[in-house]
Structures are given as structure tokens and as C-alpha cells.
Image (spheres, helix red, strand yellow):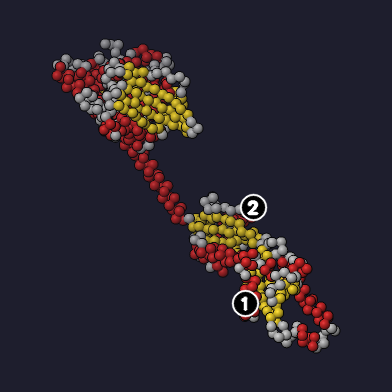
Amino acid sequence: MSDTDVPKLIAQGAFADGEAAMRFVTSVLEASTEYSIIATDVDGVIQLWNEGARRLYGYATSEIIGRPTSVLHVVEDAERGLPQTMMQQAREHGKWEGTVARVRKDGSEFTARVTVTPRRGGDDEPIGFLLMSRDITHELRLAAELERSRYTLSVIESAPDAMVIVDDAGEIRLANAETEALFGYSREELIGRPAEMLIPARYHDSHPGHRSIFFAEPRMRPMRSGLELSGERKDGVEFPIEISLSPLKTGDVWLATAAIRDVTERKLFERDLQEANIKLEAASRAKDGFLASMSHELRTPLNAILGFTGTLLMSLPGPLNAEQTKQLRTVQASGRHLLSLINDLLDLARIEAGKVELRVESIGCQELLEEVAVGLRPLADEKSLELAVPAAPDRLEVRSDRRALSQILINFANNAIKFTDEGSIRLEVSQRADDEALVTRFSVIDTGCGIKPGDQERMFAAFEQIGASGAHPYEGTGLGLFICLRLANFIGASITFVSEFGEGSAFTLEVSETR
Amino acid sequence: MTAKASILVVEDNEHNLALIDYLLKAYGYAPMLARNGSDAVRTASEACPDVILLDIRLPGMDGYEVAAVIRETPGLERTRIVAVTASAMVGDRERIVAAGFDGYVQKPIDPETFIGTLEPFLSEQPARDLAAGHPAS
């Protein structure tokens, strides 16, 4: 046995008396400041409390002697009889060992590694227990940190980007597998070498400056934040890279974690996209040219058709009989109709091709309606219809595209005149404002024939002619409302209508301006 | 009839040329005709017309080029150039005005109003105004 065998030492006369032996044992117990040593009786009542226990639990010896060990447990453990279980096990197996939640005098909790062993009397009967415990909170935290570090390392290692950790002197401290794959160096060739080895020589002078800037104010710099550089492989091949930087502090040392991505493919893709855009622009220009040519080529023959029909009807070459006049009028009407179709189709083609320029300006609503009315008054007068623009109480203004508004309203009014045989057409404007928007409503209200419910659905479709019956012979192109809808859509307005067959219709253009 | 303005019509489409020729004659004018840009320039330099009715889309030299040459030709300072064109796309009118044309008539023309539209350019009065630096609108 070693010379810590106290009974043996006593037997050898190492101590002057029992008191000296006791002082020796006590000094040993009290010197154990990092281990809590507690002795209890068989029922777990504390009998001895050393310096380590005082430090660990915060109780003075006088406060704790005579109290059960259950006060050192968290309530849940005490309630489920853990203290008894520990003692029971120690008695049966000679030892209980485990990790236990402990409570200090001040109520704070910690994790302790506890060993319980039975103390035996002279007859080998248990006379109590010895509890040795140690605070392992710190160890657990270290273990967790280690685990986290391992996890971080595994994440870095398996990252899809090349990841390089560099210190403030620019030395590579760590590089992952993807770095090896991307740059062609082994890790042995990288670690401890300057990071500049990964970029082309022409950047070697400027790079340390960038690094100083980063370490002067270490903060996250994500990808696509303008850090576009070039990388250079071991074999000298240069390639475009994108890099993100994040600071990493270990102890007092700042490190930079760089994620490096090869953007060769993206650059190629961007170039392809740019080329495609150039082609698209060329195609768009070709389309413009085509539209202009088509417009010109379709009008050119109509010039001679309508022109000579006109000269004949003017009787310039000589007088016509009634039948000749009638037939030439038909040629003229059909020619004019063809011209309207060409104009409408070109309008439509321009809107669809996005060739209509949106010019938003402040427009006086009443003035706009009056302009529309002036242009159409001759047509209304021909049918003895009243075309009225009732005065609005206030001067209302709308911010929109004048040409589009005007074209839509002219179309509405034109239709209203066309389908009204007696009564009036009223052009009205009203405005309402709420917190979100200013809504301007232009309405064209007629006392005409109205629209049958069955016709209302197809009214806005291309080439649909509503009411092209005996009373209202074939007129217009059937594209008017279709174009209106497209134009309204283009300027962000909406079109609604109400119609009572035989009573009249009201078409409304609603322009909403968000505030 | 001697007071009538002299007119050069430049138009590559035979039917349209015939129409304008017919209309002008019906109103008592005796137009000269050209079917392409270089003919137009040659005829204009020789005959010094008061008014040129100029198509824009012409084979070879187009209407813009013809107008530019005529504007630079000595003796044709007083000649008024009116575009008669089937180009009706957005911006065409602005482009024509910017190119220094005095007027613009869109095809298809309306024979009933055509001569009336040209009236300001056909009477001799505005030509003198132009020479005096007061172009008619």
C-alpha cells in the first residue's frame, strides 16, 4: 500500500496521536478544493462537508450538516427519489457514478459528475456514503465547442464552394477539398503559403491592401456584392471568380473565411444572354421596319383605288348615272373600310409589340371630353343626336397618357353615335379618392339600342360586330373595343359597361392612380 | 392660267402618279412628272418648279435625300416641298417636318380635299412670304 494508507501510517507511528492523524485527514479533505467531498449517514444525512463542497454548492459547513443530500438535487430529481436510488445502487454495487443536475445555495444549477460509494464500519456494515462530485459544466461546454468546430470543419470541407481561411498576414490556414479541385493545388501546397498564390500576378500588389481593409473592419461581404476577381490555377490558367468574405474570430485572432466560386459558366451565360438580347433588339428593329413597310405597302394601292373612285364620284371625267354613282359609293365605302382595318391592325400591332410609348402627363378631364366631343359633333349632328359634355362642379385632372385616353373615349363615343338613333350621348367625368388611390371615371352614356346580354361577352373580342343587323348595317372594323381594351391595359386603366337592351349603354374608363 | 403654280410630282407608283397628274390637270395645273429621285433632282434644277409634291419611299434616292439636295441647289430656294406619303407610322410626320419639308399630305389622299390642302403652297403669295422669311404655316 502507498503511504496514504492512514490506518497503516497510524500503526507505523507516523502521527504523534489520534488528533494529529485527524488533522492530517482533515487537511487532505480541505485541500481538495476542486472536488466536493461529502460524507453522509446511511439515510443520506450530511455529516461531512469539505472546502470543495463549500465552493461548489455555496453552503457553509454549519448550514448543511444534518440536512439530506436531496437539497443538492433539482426538485424533479429529488421528487422522483434519485438521491435514494443513488445510495441504493452504491450499496448494492459498491459504487454509483453518473452525471447529475445540481443546485447551489443561490438556486443556480450546474452539471456535476458524481460518484457515490458506501462507507463501511468495522463489521463491514454500511454506515454511510461518500459523495465525490465535480462541476463539469465547463467540460461540457468545451465538448460542445469541439463538436461545433468539428461540424464547422465538416461543413467547410464539404462546401460546394472553395473555402479558404486566411489570417491577417495573408497566410492560408485552412483550405477545403473544393479548393484543391478548383485551383489544382494539394492542401500541403496551400497551408502556410500566401493567399496571393491563388490570384494572377498582376493583382499581387493590390491584394494585401484589400486584405488590410477587410481586417480593419471585419464584416460579412456576401457573394454578388461586387467582389469579382480572377483566380489562377496551379497550371497558370486564369478564370473568373466571385468571392464572399466572412470574419472569424478565434481567441484574439481575426481570420477571414473566403468562399470562392468559379463563375466561368455564369459569365458565359451572361455573355450568351447579352448576345441574345442584341439579337432580340435587332429582331425588334426588323419588326418595326416590317410594320412600317406593311403600313406603307397596304396604303399605296388604296391611294389609287380611293383616289380614282373619288375623281369619278366628283364627276371630274364626266357625269355618272344613278347606278354608277351607287356602285362607286360601294367601292368607296369598302375602300375606306379597308383603310380603317389597316389602321386598326397597325395600331394593334404597335400596342402588342410594345411600340406605343407611354407619355404620362396631367390632363384636364373636362377639356379632354370636350376635345372628343368637338371631333365627333359632325357625326352626331348628321343623326340629329345631342352630344353633351355636362359641366363638372370642379376642375378635375388625371395623370395618364393623353393619346390612349383620347383614343379609347373617341371609340366609345363613336360607337354610341353609331348605335343611337335618337336621344343623346353624354360624356361625363367623376373622381373619387381614398387613402390608396385617386380614381377617375370617364363615362360615355347613350340612349341607344343597348346590347343584348348574349352579345355582351363577345363584344370585346377581335372582329366581333355587335348589332350588325338590318337597323345597323355593317360598319367599323370590329377591332375598336378590342384595341380599347389593349390600350386600357397598357395604361393601367380598366373598362366596364352597363347596358339595357333597348334602353341604352354606358361605357366607363376607370383610371386609378395610386397615391 | 398663266398664274398657276408650276408643280413637279415625284412618285414611283404609276397609278398614284396618274391619279395626282389627273387631279392637278382637272384643276388646271400642268404638272411635270418624275418617277425617281435622280429624275426629280434633274427636272427640278432645270425647271425650277414652285412646288414639288414628293413621295418619300422612292427607289434609289429617297424623298429625304431629294429634299436635302433641292434645299442645297441654287435657284430652288423658293421651291416649296410637300411630302405626299403613305408612311403613317408614329414619328413619320415629325421626321418629315424636321427634314425641312413645307407640308405633309398622307396617302391615301382624298381627291375632294387634296387641292384645297395644297392651296397654301400653290398660290404664289406664300412663296414670296417664304422668300421674305415669313413661311406660311
Chain letter for mark 2, please.
Answer: A
**Residue A205 against residue A489 in the figure, above or below:** below
Percent position of residue A157, x then y? 53, 65
Amino acid type at circle 2 is Glu
Residue carrying label 2: A217
Upstream in sequence: badge 2 or badge 1? 1
As helix, strand or loop, the secondary structure at mark 1 comes to helix
Percent position of residue A34, x then y? 72, 71
Percent position of residue A366, x then y? 42, 21
Bin the neighbour count of mark 2 within 10 Å (Cα to Cα): few under 14, some 14-19, many 20 and up: few
**Quadrant of the rendered image containing residue A19:** bottom right
In the image, taking residue A470 as reference, residue A179 lies left or right, namely: right
In the image, taking residue A41 as reference, residue A440 lies left or right, namely: left
Q: Nearer the viewer, mark 2 or mark 1?
A: 1
Residue carrying label 1: A89
Look at 39% across and 34% down and name the residue there.
Answer: A490
Chain letter for mark 1, please.
Answer: A
**Quadrant of the rendered image containing residue B58:** top left
**Residue A251 against residue A408 in the figure, above or below:** below
